[in-house]
Amino acid sequence: MKTRKKLWGGGYGKATAGIVEQFTQSVSFDKRLAPFDIRGSIAHAEMLGRTGIISRKDSDKIVRGLKTILSDIEKGKFTWDESLEDLHMNIESELTRRIGEAGKRLHTGRSRNDQVATAFRLYCADASRRIIYAIRDLISAIDKVSKQYKGKLMPAYTHLQQAQPTTFDLWLSAYREMLLRDIARFEDAASLAMASSPLGSGALMGSSLPLDRKYTAEKLGFEKVSVSTLDSVSDRDFALELLFASALFQIHLSRLAEDLIVYSTKEFGFVKLDDSVTTGSSLMPQKKNPDVCELTRGKSGRVIGNLVSLLTTIKGLPMTYNRDLQEDKEPVFDSVDTVILSASAMSLAVNTMKFNSERAESAIDPSMMATDLAEHLVEHGMPFREAHETVARLIHSGVNLSKCVAADLEELHPLLKGAFNRLSPHESVRRRSKR
């Protein structure tokens, strides 16, 4: 790695050691903040020109230069230099090379501390919105399949033991509710990221220059300027909020994936996953493995780990900014990439799966209507605890409810007269669904 003069290196007599440059550089990963960093820099440059801190001419020149750099970055024509540490120094160095002395005025009244906090907030808000789009795609897939198999019976489980009858669309609706909560959390994460602008906070104590922080906050879409400059350069609550929302969303995806893995086994056979979302075995010709679901389940570990990673990084930091906070970005970038990719893959899995309604309905054991019989007894005056015990004794005594006829039930207990329709899984679901 070629060592170059640092923009902060005016008082240094020795070059940074190569291993230190390699260890401290962040441009290899933080360059994805470039569009957001340049948005912040354009707003800052315009503000400097409006307030007369720099000339309008220089301000306009800076803005034009930044836009051409952004265009080159988007086209993949920009060369990143790790010896310049991060994306901020890369962009400022290239700006000065392109437009001359005016480029040196961009950083007036600003520190990398408030600069990166601003760019990172803009990124997190944007990422939250992109994740919401991915969740909505998954909800659309759930809605489509739910409509296709509406009312088709299947067993529902507690403790992975048969519990009560349900329908395929009601089972899917549980995940729909989870995903709606996820959307609300990501909306909150985006709002928190844009709640206050750190730009103008400087390294920690702001600036003696007459900066117009309200202008840049409004220009960038923030609700207001931050109250405490010391807090705003070191605050990463917004990133943790995004990481928590991502971790819980990935957990919800993992639960859906686990159900599909189980329900697609030969032993269950309720669901058939499409060939496009399964893979084969290098040895066993018959295998179709639910790799999309398994990887979705597996990736929950890394997304949870990213949340724990940043929590651990922040937990012991003294006020205010510390270089440890360079470690905030990779966990966030990885979680955002992972949940969007997982959601897209699971959307395809759900959208293309087939439900075997005959197999699922045939798996419903009549004992799953035991609660229905108990509730019939309650409706005829028996206390619930007594009704629960009465039906439990019948079930555990070996009574085969699948072979019972109406007269048999009345023989078992007088109050079970007229309860025969309670053994119907359709009736069981109907009575509960209308509540």
Image (spheres, rainbow, N blue to C red):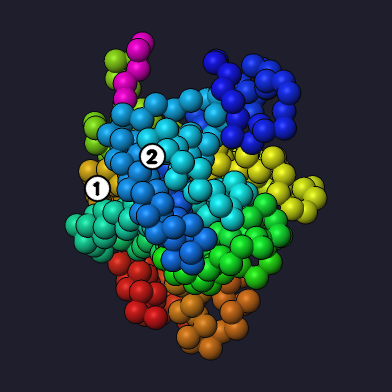
Give the camera-side residue of 142 and 111: 111
Give the camera-side residue of 88 and 55: 55
Front label number (1 vs 2): 2
Stretch of the chain drawn in magenta: 279-283
Residue 7 spot, x, y in % from top left: 59, 34
Write the residue at 40% across / 59% down. Answer: 56
What amino acid type should be assigned to the residue bearing mark 1? Asn
* Numbered tag placed on residue 305 in the rendering: none
In this rendering, would 268 be left or right of 15?
left
Binning the other alpha carbons within 10 Å of mark 1 as few (below 14), some (14 to 19) or many (20 upward) gives many
Write the residue at 24% across / 36% down. Answer: 274
Task: Please identify the quadrant where the C terminus is shown.
Answer: bottom left
In this rendering, would 224 be left or right of 65?
right
What amino acid type should be assigned to the residue bearing mark 2? Ile
Look at the numbered disc 1 and give the secondary structure of its residue: helix
Give the camera-side residue of 137 and 255: 137
Main SS, magenta residues:
loop
Which image quarter: residue 289?
A: top left
The numbered mark, 1 or 2, whose residue comes first in the sequence reads 2
Residue 384 spot, x, y in % from top left: 59, 79
Circle 2 residue: 99
Residue 46 is one of the magenta-drawn residues = no
Binning the other alpha carbons within 10 Å of mark 2 as few (below 14), some (14 to 19) or many (20 upward) gives some
Would you say residue 189 is visible in this rendering?
no
